[in-house]
Amino acid sequence: MKRMGDVGLAVIIIGVIAIVLSAAVIIFSANVQSRIPLNIGDGVFTAKLANTPSLRAGAVSGVTDLSNNQALIMAYPSDSKWTVSVSDIKTSMDIVWIDSNKKIVYIVTNASPDNTMSSVFAPKSDARYVVILPAGSTDNLNIKSGRSAVFDLGGTAVQ
């Protein structure tokens, strides 16, 4: 009888450990930026995805460099005139706003706190996504308003 109690206790302990580990994986994965391919204009980028308030909040802050094939997609749960502050970035960047149909609706080129009167940028129409690209990408890669971007969030939830 004592042996049955020991086995039951072991099963309960293993079950609790499995639940705790599963919860840790879910919490950790919610705060990790996934990388997705982004085709925009004539460019192909590997984009980090910021799809939660905490990931979007610090996404642009402190950016020091973007290589020619890197991008950042900030995905929002609804359409709005989402703003981007460049007050504490260390390099210039292009900012592209994209609507829910993945059409480019607005572009700011070479945004930097050093070369502008404003450090906060907003589109003139609603957007669902804000894409950060290396400075000069929009000019060099034929990225223009009205054109489409191609990317797939792969079922990733946007909060």
Image: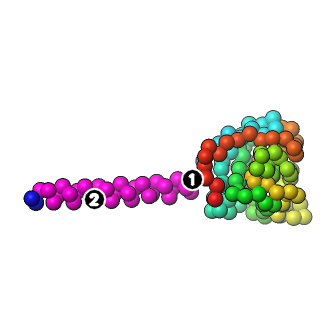
**Badge 1: how crowded within 10 Å, few (<14), some, or many (20+)?**
few
11 relative position to 138: left or right:
left
In three-dimensional space, the C-alpha distance between marks 1 and 2, rounded to whole angstroms, equals 29 Å
Q: Which residue is mark 1?
A: 32
Q: Position of residue 92 (x, y in %)?
A: 81, 53
Q: Quadrant of the N terminus?
A: bottom left
Q: Residue furthest right?
A: 117
Mark closest to the chain's N terminus, 1 or 2 = 2
Of marks 1 and 2, the one in the foreground: 2
- Camera-nearest residue between 151 and 131: 151
**What SS does tag 2 mark?**
helix
Query: Relative to 137, is 24 above or below?
Result: below
148 relative position to 5: left or right:
right
Examine the image and state in which quarter residue 113 appears.
Answer: bottom right
Q: Quadrant of the C terminus?
A: bottom right
Q: Residue at x 50, y 58 (%)?
A: 27
**Badge 2: how crowded within 10 Å, few (<14), some, or many (20+)?**
few
Q: Residue at x 70, y 41 (%)?
A: 151
Q: Amino acid at mark 2?
A: Ile
Q: Residue furthest top?
A: 42
Q: Which residue is mark 2?
A: 13
Any magenta on residue 102? no
Any magenta on residue 19? yes
Q: Magenta region: which residues?
A: 3-32
Q: Position of residue 54 (x, y in %)?
A: 63, 62
Dominant secondary structure (helix, strand or loop) of the stretch shown in magenta: helix
Query: Relative to 6, is 134 above or below?
Result: above
Q: Amino acid at mark 1?
A: Val
Q: Residue furthest left?
A: 1
Examine the image and state in which quarter residue 116 appears.
Answer: bottom right
